[in-house]
Amino acid sequence: MTVRELLQQHRTLRGIAVGGCIETTKASLDVAHGHHRADSFYGWICIPDLRDLNPTNVIHELAHILRRNDRHDEAWKKTVRQLGGRVERRYLKNSAANGKST
């Protein structure tokens, strides 16, 4: 699935900001993120660089938006798969060190 198809199929996804955060208008952004809180930025995905704009990253962040949280729990993994994505290896195992499900 292409990024364009994701935008067309998911009305929850309001847009993608590349190179900064739509909320803070910071010029630099370290990691991609999806705005999942119920505020005026809900549904936006922010991507650090055009090179990072790909279906894997968009699906990852869209799943956070749809789940309305930033956790990488089982519900998030299921949502990623339902969107046609794959769960990256680093999120497949539970992290006992920090007590979070990843």
Image (cartoon, rainbow, N blue to C red):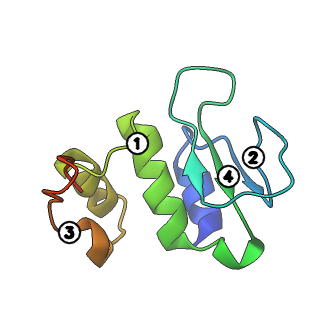
- Residue carrying label 2: 21
51 relative to 73 in the view: left or right: right
Q: Secondary structure at mark 4?
A: strand
- Residue carrying label 3: 92
Q: Is residue 85 above or below residue 11?
A: below
Quarter that holds the C terminus:
bottom left
- Residue carrying label 4: 46
Q: Quadrant of residue 75?
A: top left
> Which amino acid type corresponds to the residue marked 3 in the rendered image?
Leu
- Residue carrying label 1: 70
In the image, what residue occupies the spot 72% across and 57% down? 29
Q: Is residue 1 visible?
A: no
Disc 1: CA contacts within 10 A as few (<14), some (14-19) or many (>=20): some
> Which amino acid type corresponds to the residue marked 2 in the rendered image?
Cys
Q: Earlier in the sequence, mark 4 or mark 2?
A: 2
Q: Position of residue 72 (x, y in %)?
A: 30, 52
Circles 4, 2 touching at the beta carbon (< 8 Å): yes
Gap between marks 3 and 1 measured at Cα: 15 Å
Disc 2: CA contacts within 10 A as few (<14), some (14-19) or many (>=20): many
